[in-house]
Image: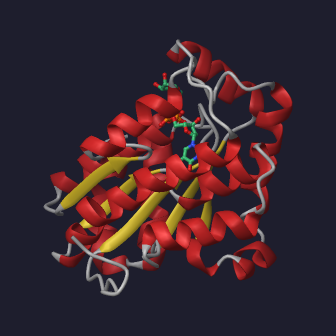
Amino acid sequence: MQNNDDPVTPRGLFLVFEGGEGVGKTTQWHRLADTLRAVGHDVVAVREPGGTAAGDAIRSLLLDPTSELAAESEALLFAASRAQLVRDVIAPALHRGAIVLVDRFLLSTYAYQGAGRGLPMSSLQAVNAFATGGIRPDLTLLLSVPLDMAQARQQARGASDRMEQEDLAFHQRVRAAFEVALTAAWEGEHPEVGPVVAIGADMPVDVVTVRCLEALVARWPERFTAAATAALAAI
Ligand SMILES: Nc1ncnc2c1ncn2[C@@H]1O[C@H](COP(=O)(O)OP(=O)(O)O)[C@@H](O)[C@H]1O
Ligand SMILES: Cc1cn([C@H]2C[C@H](O)[C@@H](COP(=O)(O)OP(=O)(O)O)O2)c(=O)[nH]c1=O
């Protein structure tokens, strides 16, 4: 296990999927993991909250519609799950050179607990710096679709959790926060998030996968051209 006195110096690649509910993050996270493994990459795919025994217990508490949590407790629980995931899974995988794909990370906290719940950004940054020990994504793929499409996809998926049950105004604040994260000014103020790239996800699943891979090829051509070629051939 890492501790905060032992800085993480990863060799692998840390990639994050972000966006509101129903944009297709989980679908693309699965597909990208499968596509990369098929061409021989060592891939570790985990989701937040969760991905460890403690994190999965925290996830149940956070998403259970009957849980009554103050906004501050909620933020600390998301951060606790993240702290465990970084130390048990993400940092060790990066050290051995794996590609780590995470379904949600810091940006979700800023959008949901910051914009959604109205907690101060400086507190969230401090708590999360402690939680992550300073480990930073190499790239965040921020998926977006028009609101009506996200809602239709969400309804098709069924049963809603504690966060999904929040009102429309909450989800509009979350959505707006994700959009702001694409601006150069926001990125400049949040170096801990790393670079963020927008992926238009309002297309068939296969096409969105190719878009994700193209974003990776643009940064790391040697590493991802084979996977992108295979994904294109599969359409
Ligand atoms: N590109 C797409 N086109 C049509 N349906 C999709 C697409 N991507 C995902 N879906 C469907 O939409 C629903 C939500 O997708 P999911 O990946 O769970 O979204 P998220 O993780 O962002 O909430 C699922 O039923 C999924 O099968
Ligand atoms: C990681 C994270 C997630 N969340 C929320 C977003 C989701 O509503 C929920 C995770 O549920 P999940 O089912 O994983 O998301 P999705 O349905 O989009 O695939 O937790 C936060 O509020 N803060 C966070 O830091």
Q: Residue at x 34, y 64 (%)?
A: 86
| Residue 15 left/right relative to 44 | right
| Residue 61 left/right relative to 153 | left
In the image, 103 versus 121, the foreground residue is 121
Name above or below for residue 229 compared with residue 150: below
Q: How many numbered markers are drawn?
A: 0
Name the quarter where the C terminus is drawn. top left
Specify whether residue 106 is in view: yes
Colour scheme of the rendered structure: secondary structure
Could you say where residue 232 lies in the image, as x and y percent from the top left?
37, 51
Specify whether residue 228 is in view: no
Name the quarter where the N terminus is drawn. bottom left
Could you say where residue 25 lies in the image, as x and y percent from the top left?
50, 42
Could you say where residue 55 lies in the image, as x and y percent from the top left?
35, 44
Q: Residue at x 35, y 87 (%)?
A: 5
Q: Residue at x 66, y 19 (%)?
A: 152
